[in-house]
Amino acid sequence: MKPAVIIIDMLDDFVTGALANPRAQRIIPRIAELAAAARERGWPVVYANDAHLPGDFEERVWGPHALAGTPGARVIAELAPREGDLELPKRVYSAFHETGLDAYLRQHGVDTVILCGQHTNICVRHTAADALYRGYRIIVPPDAVEAFSDEDHESGLAYLDMAYRAELTPVAQVLGAVPAG
Ligand code: ZN
């Protein structure tokens, strides 16, 4: 298994800004652990960051958020990218859509994506769909993704299992601190 950690939309606007979500605080330490372990093990760490242009279609749903080049579109300080990490701007939910992510992962021999960040039932879900279509094994640690409500989070996880057979494995088990199973 050669995994990559894909950190989705852990941006100022998604944590404390335009689309603030206090629930996101819970997952920050888990994502930090994942990213640190990945760097140690030579797994790629990729940040898939909303970087919208004014008038992007998504504004119909959410209003303006994470506009490219603004402070709201920055990765939160607690999870700031390190040297060697990759930041990919995206303009729709999926981290794969017109970002070059697939080519980057293949270039690095990646066969497994570990998806974390926000939101369980939106961008994580759409990224998982695109990962399935491209043949990746999909791991989504439930303690490293969040949504705007318990219901959105839980139904999002159930959908990831049902539609994509995503492995819902907690971070500690993914990293081998606890025996799997
Ligand atoms: Zn967006």
Image (cartoon, rainbow, N blue to C red):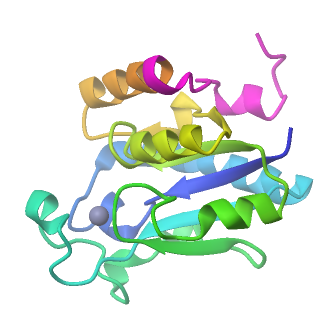
x and y percent of residue 23 in the render? 34, 42
Q: Residue at x 41, y 66 (%)?
A: 11
Residue for point 25% across, 58% down? 20
180 to the left or right of 31: right
Q: Is residue 37 left or right of residue 145?
A: right
Can residue 30 be seen by looking at this rendering? Answer: no
Work out whether 117 lies above or below 79: above
Q: Quadrant of residue 101?
A: bottom right
Q: Position of residue 28 (x, y in %)?
A: 53, 50
Quadrant of res 80: bottom right
Quarter of the rendered structure image containing ligand 1 = bottom left
Q: Which quarter of the image is occupied by the N terminus?
A: top right
Is residue 96 located in the magenta-colored stretch of the structure? no
Magenta-colored span: 162-181
| Left or right of 18 in this view: 141 | right
Q: Point out residue 168 in the picture as x, y percentages from the top left corner.
A: 58, 23
In the image, residue 176 lies in the stretch drawn in magenta: yes
Depth check, front residue: 101 or 167:
101
In the image, residue 3 sits, relative to residue 72, either above or below, namely above
Helix, strand or loop: magenta stretch: loop
